[in-house]
Amino acid sequence: MNPHSIKVACSNCNLRELCMPVGLSPEEFNRLDELVTVRRKIKRGTTLFRNGEKFTSLYAIRTGFFKTCVASEDGRDQVTGFQMAGEVVGLDGIVNDLHTCDAVALEDAEVCIMPFERIEEFSREVTGLQHHIHKILSREIVREHGVMLLLGSMRAEERLATFLLNLVQRLHARGFSQSELVLRMTREEIGSFLGLKLETVSRTFSRFVEDGVVEVKQRHVRILNTEALREIVNPRAST
């Protein structure tokens, strides 16, 4: 296979505002094009990288949806996050040169492979890239804190409302609707991420439907009352 036939030009990619630094000169964008070695297609249900695997690259998701997960003590998968087009996965491997989770495609996907050695090399030449990597790492830290807050102090309604608001906000940044989304993950995977049993997730969705907050048809979710969701998460902020 000719690698150039599947090589992505970051400078012409419609996701560049999401996963690449803004404000770069044309010359710097041309340099960044050299960062991406190839694209890789990942079939639904297959793994991009595994826990314990040697870390070599970061992966920018071009199309598709992923979950990251780790095996819990009882052998079940504990979902640690969901990632979509325009986001970067693989950051977990930077610390010890080993991945600390599995990344599994929830639908057919395509990723741009960015060898970390090249990223470090280019960061010394293109300061905007270094700053961008720091922002991505910082966002991951903030996300981790958010998950800890979810699991530590929120009721089931608050957890699911926060999850839906966050998901639709991220999708809207990619040009999708502010009120409609298709859940690429199962109810069980949502429950694993939110620290809830499957029955609790299903019951909470049903409660939201009964209250006229959302409309649900299998994996299609339409948010009918965004303010009501925000009120569930933070009553004082909405009054």
Image (cartoon, rainbow, N blue to C red):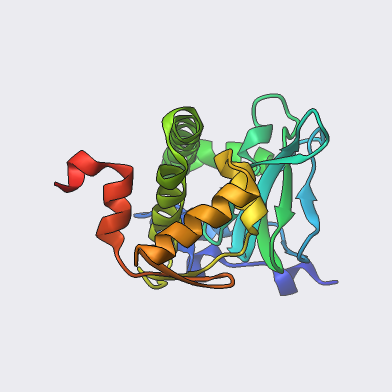
Left or right: residue 17 versus residue 230 is right
Which residue ends up furthest to the left in the rendered image? 239
- 216 over 69 or under it: above or below: below
**Residue 189's spot in the image, x, y percent?**
65, 51
**Residue 201's spot in the image, x, y percent?**
56, 51
- State the residue in front, 43 or 135: 43
Quarter of the rendering occupied by the N terminus:
bottom right
- 195 over 152 or under it: above or below: below
**Residue 101's spot in the image, x, y percent?**
72, 37
Which residue ends up furthest to the right in the rendered image? 1
Left or right: residue 103 versus residue 191 is right
Residue 87 visible in the current orientation: no
Count of numbered tags:
0
**Residue 207's spot in the image, x, y percent?**
44, 58
The residue positioned 67% from the left and 38% from the top of the image is 117
Figure quadrant of residue 24: bottom left
